[in-house]
Amino acid sequence: MPLVHAVNVHKSFHHNEVLKGIDLDVESGEVVCLLGPSGSGKTTFLRCINQLETIDGGRIWVDGDLAGFVERGDRLHRLPDKAISTQRREIGMVFQRFNLFPHMTALENVMEAPVRVRGRGKREARHRGLQLLERVGLGDHCDHYPAHLSGGQQQRVAIARALAMDPKLMLFDEPTSALDPELVGEVLTVMRELAEQGMTMIVVTHEMGFARGVADRVVFMDGGVVVEQGEPKHVIDNPQHERTRSFLSRIKAEHDEHARAIQEGLQVERG
Amino acid sequence: MTAGAVTGSGLEPTGERPGRIDAVPVRHPGRWVAVAVVAVIAALIINLLVTNAAFNWSFVFQAMVQSPVLHGLIWGTILGTVFSMVFGVVLGVVLAVMRLSENPVLRAAAFVYTWFFRAVPRLVLLSIMGTLGILWQHGLGFGVPETFARWFGSSNAALSFATINANDVFVGLIGGVVGLGLTEAAYMAEIARAGILSVDAGQTEAASALGMSRGKTMRRIVLPQAMRVIVPPTGNETIAMVKDTSLMLAVPVSAEMFFQLQAIGSRTFQTFPAEIAAVVWYLVIGTVLMIVQAQLERRFGKGFGAMTGTQQGTIARLLSFRGGMS
């Protein structure tokens, strides 16, 4: 069985159906990018995988375990909160807005869950925390509070914090969307290294360069369904569906517009 | 911005670049008038305090250190405040968590509690505390209620675990502390609720995503951040509580500072200086508490860009009254 096995996933918010039957398998070690316009349900689907949202229909299995429910007889029983927490430990999540704990230093953020949830010793957790911060290039920032770190640094601490739980799967919810353009690169670099080390990753992103260069597969979603998926070069360079094509050309236009604005800005400065 | 824009300004280009500014400051004549008025009023007050014999300062300071007064200060005023506030804060946080719970029964119970204790005045409640013993004239029993016990053909005594004299519970300092603590919990519940709601939902999500349980998320992540919002009004509540311990005379509680000073006042016919003695003690306690509050605010402001270490003195911060004088 694949690491993530989602079948016919449905989710509504107040009669507004956001996910209309998503099927998706992610193999262990695979990097999958979810693309699509805003409101297409990518983020909601990601949040369903680690049960920040409860699904209304379908099933999701993570590492062979049915997420959120247990099947007894021929009925599904909702799992108690404690069991759901146990399932979530195996899944790391990185948020668009970082969501670091502001009252803790970078190192304390990284140590918190291993110590309080896994029950590891403080010394062991500290040692591992320092290693992880080193790995995301923030070894000398471990005593800084999040308020004294840049957005890019905060997001890298958030990645280290998720990795500290030794997750089998990492979910990234638009990890670079809240960053200033010059800070995007440092976060993508860390993510790229993580992918090269074999981490299973599902990434919601608008960074086409990352999707093309790092993803094993891209999944294009629109209107709560998967429109098409495949190797990045096939989907991005040669989309089969009209909706994929118009989305990609809009992204490209925005990107070109951005590049032109920067060019003009540079010319004005020089003149 | 282009280089051409500079020549368009009001000054003719002289070839020399403008240097250091040494401008004439704006005069504030109104400020000097205010200083004069305040100085006159201050002088009048000081004159009154020093020269009016009715203050009888030597009596004031003597009264302040009488042993029943000190006993009342420590037990009724200081410990009464500490116990009432601990009682109120703990119960208040529990009520706040109940108010925010998904369980409708807990929500309703917390609402009814808050509704009742916010509506009843403290003085009235404390006075009732003193007479509450009337409800349990045969002692306050813990066990299966008599009515139920009779249905099952058992006598009350057999199913009662412990019986205590109700008057022991409700009269005196315990009654006062319970009365003050119960009302305080209703106010603290609102303060704690506002604090908990002030914490971004993303914090709870991040903690959940790491596999933390709800209880742990509340204790380790939400409450420490909520403290930043909870501490300042709790400080005010504590200072108000110091003052409201004087209401315990309605219970009545004799081991309380103001009660004792009034007693001294009426025994010696020096009512006014005795009351002034109480004022001086309240000022001392109030000052100490304001300093403690400023320290706590700094501690829980950690990581929120608040001042750390000794960047700004506590006293200076107190005197600045948030925002500072201009």
Image (cartoon, rainbow, N blue to C red):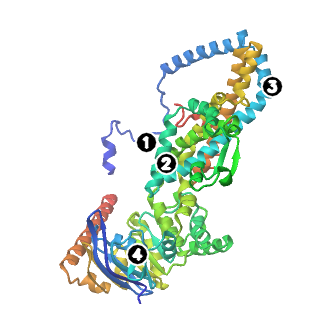
> Are tags 1 and 3 found on a single chain?
yes
Q: What's under tag 3, amino acid-wise?
A: Gln
Mark 4 Cα within 10 Å, few/some/many (few <14, many 20+)?
A: many
Q: Nearer the viewer, mark 1 or mark 3?
A: 3
Q: CA distance from mark 4 to mark 3?
A: 70 Å
Query: Vertical placement of A223 versus B254: above or below?
Result: below
Q: Nearer the viewer, mark 2 or mark 4?
A: 2
- In the visual, does B258 lie left or right of A46? right
The first of marks 2 and 3 along the sequence is 3
Q: Nearer the viewer, residue A106 or B284?
A: B284
Q: CA distance from mark 4 to mark 1?
A: 64 Å
Residue found at the very far bottom of the displayed protein: A1
Q: What's under tag 1, amino acid-wise?
A: Arg
Q: What's under tag 2, amino acid-wise?
A: Ala
Q: Which residue is mark 2?
A: B110
Query: Vertical placement of A69 versus B54: above or below?
Result: below
Q: Which residue is mark 1?
A: B17
> Are tags 4 and 1 found on a single chain?
no
Q: Nearer the viewer, residue B269 or B130?
A: B130
Q: Nearer the viewer, mark 2 or mark 3?
A: 2
Q: Is residue B297 visible?
A: no
Residue found at the very far front of the displayed protein: B153
- In the visual, does B74 lie left or right of B27? right
Report helix, strand or loop for mark 1.
Answer: loop
Residue found at the very far left of the displayed protein: A242
Residue at (31% x, 46% y) in the render: B5
